[in-house]
Image: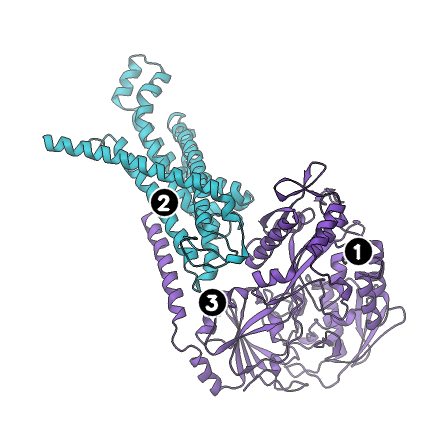
């Protein structure tokens, strides 16, 4: 008992002293500056502990792909996404698709070798794709039937169904060597043909990458990249102590200053938004509770969409580091600008009145004796989502919708979200995300994450996948969002309300030139080092 | 002689005064916490991260919640959980301890084995496991804490009852033909009661601390609830940015509450224990 009391007291005191001490720190940054002068071609980066790939650097087990897409660095990919999120080539030299969309033919460079000296051939590419199709648990490869090599530099992909955005999938699959691939050991000892070689990996601590001297493209400027995995507060202290050159951080710390560092903010499509179940309460095909009587009314969903002040949310919760979100794919080539709405509280009130929800006692709207109530869910432990949910609840309260906020674990969140709005985070470099969110899932009669289904929207997305050209498909993805009469925007069904895109914040050591960043996808991790080879010290 | 008498009266009186004062303070905290719960959960982004001032004695947090209201609401919740779990644990301990002592060798072996089993697993681990199995939240914490805190008291009661069973005055009563029920009521209960009561009150600080720690570790109450464990774990994120008041005041308040309960139990024991009652 006594020991525990003392421990509690000591912790409190220590924490206070620590905090006070940090603020009056002497000349942090010096150590790193001295070090930087010695080695102008290395960089130390702090990332969150969840960025460490659990299964190692094996593309078949999620490296580079999955929920948080980024370039695999150690391996090469066939295609890459450009800064404007269109498609460019890495290994590929050409890419064609048959009329029916079922056969993709990709030609590749003939001057590429793996870091063990063996040349990279079409056989390796075919092997990689057949392997990831079998093994990948994080990416969907059901559209691929098989890959085969036709000669040394030509790969043919046979598809099960047309998939026009296949180049976006090719941009995240790192090519592994057939002769040196063992699914048991490859993750911790990867051999690739990319810009960097894995030099050292201390699990739970750090990853050291060294430039590949035989890289076929432009030689990396950064010869050595060290990535440390640490919690946000540790990363902040490390940046303060001058131990790291670039450290991830969040809006919580944005009002702090660090000598020798500046705060860099990169735009992202890392959005947050609530799903609004679009059917009345009941049970779904699997017998789960699904639907919500209040949000089932499209007028209510529209009122919520225009009744929320996104900029206020950004100023309050994100300290200004964010942009209003109107869709899951803001600023992507497949984004439809019709998604944008103006903040209009009067309009929202009118819509609610029109829906029959009249202002009742205590500022809460009522209809036929029922009160306008919502239980908003957020994933417990995520303080930004919690604050966004609280702000959203406050704003809905002003509209006359009484909200409670509840933290849930991810083990139950997916099922709970079928009937109560949950705050989600999405944003990826592929239009497939629109499909995952809005398209009716198989024969369940409803989209996967929130009850909703619209045949017109489904048809556009099916068509978008079936056409042969990417440009053409972008247009169809846009129509799926809004075609003038139907869609998922304000005038349409609004099954989700999007709130903000969270800027990704980093402490950057003075003198470090971080190359221009693509719009960051969801996940505050590896995407910042996508082009670490082009970074430089000045 | 006179001086000694004076002294003993003073001790007894001051103890009773202390008990009343402590009980009043704890009751006040509990009631004010219940009344302030709404206020403690109210977010207002126009007043975020304020340092303690006259208006907000404990400051405000990153969502503009009044930390004084949150702390009181959290303490109140902790005390209520402590009350519930202590009563449940003590009840379990009384039933099992007595059963082990009077129901024969086999029952004793089974119950003693259970006691050893539960005591053999580190408390915090057991609380976490049970809490997760019961779906976390209020139910999880109450189940976790009450199912893990009964063994030591059960063991004490078992020992007392065993000892009493063979005490000469009980044996004499039996020989005189007093009924079993009367023996328990008139001879055993008055002896067990003080042990039981102090045991129960001393369970409070344990229960409160374990509730706070399991919540702190993220296996207890949900993060939107105003619980001390939640407040402390949240404040950890902000310590590095110099927001000391988020951890300091709630932490101190928790420590004070726990100390108050511990002292309450200790004084009560002295008062009720025949060996020290007349010191």
Residue at image position (27%, 24%) is B167
Q: Are marks 1 and 2 on the same chain?
A: no
Q: Residue A534: x, y in percent?
A: 62, 83
Q: Which chain is cyan?
A: B
Residue corresponding to mark 1:
A492
Instruction: Tell me the SS state at disc 1.
Output: loop
Q: CA distance from mark 1 to mark 3?
A: 45 Å
* Marks 1 and 2 close (CB-CB < 8 Å): no
Vertical arrangement, residue B229 with respect to residue A57, above or below = above
Q: Residue furthest top?
A: B177
Image-quadrant location for residue A191: bottom right
Q: Which chain is purple?
A: A
Label of residue A234 in the image: 3
Which chain letter goes with mark 1?
Answer: A
Q: Is residue B76 found left or right of A536 in the rendered image?
A: left
Instruction: Tell me the SS state at disc 3.
Output: helix
Render colour scheme = by chain
Image-quadrant location for residue A210: bottom right
Which chain letter goes with mark 3?
Answer: A
Q: Residue A220: x, y in percent?
A: 61, 84
Residue at image position (72%, 43%) is A357
Is residue A450 among the parts visible in the rendering?
no
Label of residue B258 in the image: 2
């Amino acid at each position: 008992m006594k020991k525990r009391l003392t421990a509690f007291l000591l912790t409190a005191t220590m924490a206070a002293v620590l905090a006070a001490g940090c603020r009056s720190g002497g000349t942090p940054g010096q150590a790193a500056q001295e070090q930087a002068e010695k080695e102008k071609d290395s960089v130390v980066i702090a990332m969150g502990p969840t960025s460490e790939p659990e299964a190692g650097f094996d593309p078949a087990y999620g490296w580079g792909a999955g929920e948080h897409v980024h370039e695999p660095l150690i391996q090469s990919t066939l295609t890459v996404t450009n800064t404007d999120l269109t498609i460019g080539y890495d290994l590929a030299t050409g890419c064609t698709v048959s009329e029916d969309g079922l056969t993709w033919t990709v030609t590749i460079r003939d001057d590429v070798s793996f870091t063990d000296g063996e040349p990279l051939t079409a056989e390796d590419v075919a092997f990689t794709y057949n392997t990831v199709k079998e093994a990948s648990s994080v990416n969907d490869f059901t559209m691929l039937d098989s890959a085969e090599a036709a000669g040394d530099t030509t790969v043919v992909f046979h598809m099960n169904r047309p998939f026009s955005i296949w180049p976006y999938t090719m941009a995240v699959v790192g090519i592994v060597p057939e002769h040196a691939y063992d699914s048991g050991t490859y993750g911790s000892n990867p051999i690739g043909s990319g810009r960097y070689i894995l030099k050292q990996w201390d699990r739970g601590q750090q990853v050291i990458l060294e430039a590949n001297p035989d890289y076929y493209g432009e030689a990396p400027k950064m010869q050595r990249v060290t990535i440390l995995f640490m919690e946000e507060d540790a990363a902040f202290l490390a940046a303060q102590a001058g131990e790291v050159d670039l450290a991830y951080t969040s809006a919580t710390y944005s009002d702090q200053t660090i000598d020798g560092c500046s705060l860099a903010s990169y735009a992202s499509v890392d959005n947050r938004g609530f799903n609004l179940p679009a059917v009345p309460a009941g049970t779904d095909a699997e017998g789960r509770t699904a639907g919500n009587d209040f949000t089932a009314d499209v007028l209510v969903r529209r009122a919520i969409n225009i009744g929320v002040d996104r900029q206020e949310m950004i100023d309050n919760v994100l300290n200004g580091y964010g942009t209003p979100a109107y869709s899951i794919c803001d600023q992507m080539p497949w984004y439809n600008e019709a998604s944008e709405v103006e903040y209009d509280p009067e309009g929202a009130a009118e819509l609610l009145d029109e829906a029959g929800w009249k202002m009742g006692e205590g500022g809460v709207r009522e209809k036929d004796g029922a009160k306008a109530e919502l239980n908003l869910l957020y994933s417990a432990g995520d303080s930004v989502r919690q604050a966004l949910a609280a702000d959203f609840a406050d704003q809905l309260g002003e509209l006359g919708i009484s909200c409670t906020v509840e933290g849930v674990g991810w083990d139950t969140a997916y099922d709970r979200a079928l009937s109560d709005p949950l705050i989600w985070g999405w944003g990826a470099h592929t239009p497939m995300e629109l499909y995952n969110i809005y398209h009716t899932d198989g024969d369940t009669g409803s989209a996967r994450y929130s009850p909703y289904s619209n045949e017109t929207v489904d048809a556009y997305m099916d068509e978008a996948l079936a056409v042969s050209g990417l440009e053409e498909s972008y247009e169809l993805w846009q129509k799926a969002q809004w075609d003038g009469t139907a869609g998922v925007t304000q005038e349409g069904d609004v099954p989700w309300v999007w709130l903000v895109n969270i800027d990704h914040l980093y402490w950057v050591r003075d003198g470090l030139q971080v190359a221009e960043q693509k719009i960051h996808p969801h996940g505050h991790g590896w995407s910042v080092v996508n082009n670490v080879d082009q970074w430089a010290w000045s | 002689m006179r001086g000694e008498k004076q002294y003993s009266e003073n001790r007894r009186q001051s103890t009773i005064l202390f008990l009343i004062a402590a009980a009043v303070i704890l009751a006040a905290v509990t009631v004010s916490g219940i009344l302030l719960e709404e206020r403690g959960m109210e977010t207002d982004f126009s007043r975020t991260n304020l340092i303690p001032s006259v208006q907000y004695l404990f400051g405000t947090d990153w969502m503009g919640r009044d930390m004084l209201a949150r702390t009181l609401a959290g303490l109140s919740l902790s005390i209520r959980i402590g009350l519930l779990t202590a009563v449940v644990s003590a009840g379990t301990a009384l039933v099992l301890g007595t059963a082990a002592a009077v129901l024969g060798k086999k029952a004793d072996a089974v119950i003693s084995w259970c006691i050893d089993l539960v005591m053999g697993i580190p408390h915090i681990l057991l609380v976490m496991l049970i809490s997760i199995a019961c779906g976390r939240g209020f139910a999880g914490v109450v189940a976790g804490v009450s199912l893990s805190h009964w063994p030591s008291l059960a063991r004490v009661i078992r020992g007392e009852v065993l000892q009493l069973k063979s005490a000469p005055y009980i044996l004499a009563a039996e020989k005189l033909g007093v009924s079993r029920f009367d023996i328990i009521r008139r001879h055993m209960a008055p002896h067990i009661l003080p042990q039981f009561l102090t045991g129960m009150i001393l369970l409070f600080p344990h229960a409160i601390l374990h509730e706070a720690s399991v919540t702190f570790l993220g296996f207890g109450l949900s993060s939107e609830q105003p619980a001390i464990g939640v407040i402390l774990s949240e404040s950890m994120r902000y310590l590095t940015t110099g927001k000391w008041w988020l951890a300091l005041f709630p932490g101190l308040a928790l420590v004070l509450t726990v100390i108050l309960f511990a002292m309450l139990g200790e004084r009560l024991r002295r008062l009720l224990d025949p060996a020290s009652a007349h010191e």
